[in-house]
């Protein structure tokens, strides 16, 4: 982009530079995907509100998502992986995985509490159980199997985002 900025400064008055072709299609595509992602998140939230019969738990579920996204983006930056379509697809998958993990965490906490365990004990046991699950080799295997150059950003996004998002949720 620095070369483009230099080019834009050197053109004579009355002319303009516009980005077209593949780059314009990519920008448009990401905009469309962002809209679809927003609609999907709202739909999932509403489904969770109906499932839990109130809005507090769905808010807690979605509170873990930003941690996962930030962790995934940091991992991509550290590894020098560009944010493209596959990384975006990884973020979309990551949101679903984190929401699923947090729902399972809530379910385990409620089950232990209903069986008579004090709430604090149920929270600790659920956290340990879910943390043990995330210390398994699964995220590393996912990253390994997504080692082809075109799928590498998706594997890295999901593996690092799940490790960050669900660990922080606990």
Image (cartoon, rainbow, N blue to C red):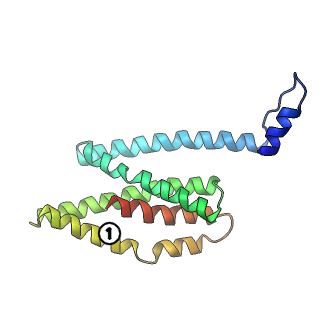
Look at the numbered disc 1 and give the secondary structure of its residue. helix
Q: Which residue is mark 1?
A: 130
Quarter the C terminus occupies: bottom left
Q: Residue furthest bottom?
A: 137
Q: Residue furthest top?
A: 14
Q: Position of residue 141 (x, y in %)?
A: 52, 76
Q: Give the answer, above or below, for where 144 lies relative to 87.
A: below
What residue is shown at x 21% (from left), y 62% (from top)? 109
Q: Give the answer, above or below, for where 56 lies relative to 9.
A: below
Q: Residue furthest right?
A: 12
What residue is shown at x 43% (from left), y 44% (from top)? 41
User: Is residue 24 toward the left or the right of residue 159 in the image?
Assistant: right
Quarter the N terminus occupies: top right
Q: Position of residue 3 (x, y in %)?
A: 82, 44
User: Is residue 15 toward the left or the right of residue 42 in the image?
Assistant: right
Which residue is at the front of the view, 147 or 166? 166
Q: Position of residue 154 (x, y in %)?
A: 58, 61
How many C-alpha atoms fall within 10 Å of the one at disc 1: few (<14), some, or many (≥20)? some
Q: Position of residue 90 (x, y in %)?
A: 54, 58
**How many marks are shown on the rendered structure?**
1
What residue is shown at x 58% (from left), y 52% (from top)? 88
Q: Give the answer, above or below, for where 101 lies relative to 16.
A: below
Quadrant in the rendering for residue 35? top right
Quadrant in the rendering for residue 27? top right
What residue is shown at x 27% (from left), y 42% (from top)? 55
Which residue is at the front of the view, 61 or 43? 61
């Amino acid at each position: 982009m620095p070369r483009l900025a230099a080019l834009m400064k050197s053109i004579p008055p009355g002319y303009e530079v516009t980005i077209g072709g593949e780059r314009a299609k990519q920008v448009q595509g990401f905009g469309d995907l962002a809209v679809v992602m927003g609609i999907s998140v709202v739909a999932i939230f509403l489904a969770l509100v109906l499932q839990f019969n109130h809005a507090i738990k769905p808010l807690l579920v979605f509170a873990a998502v930003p941690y996962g996204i930030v962790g995934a983006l940091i991992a991509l930056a550290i590894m020098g992986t560009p944010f493209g379509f596959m990384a975006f697809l990884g973020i979309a998958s990551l949101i679903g995985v984190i929401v699923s993990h947090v729902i399972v965490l809530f379910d385990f906490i409620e089950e232990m509490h209903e069986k008579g365990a004090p709430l604090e004990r149920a929270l600790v046991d659920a956290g340990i159980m879910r943390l043990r699950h995330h210390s398994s080799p699964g995220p590393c295997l996912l990253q390994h199997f997504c080692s082809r150059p075109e799928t590498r950003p998706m594997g890295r996004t999901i593996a690092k985002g799940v490790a960050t998002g669900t660990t922080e949720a606990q």
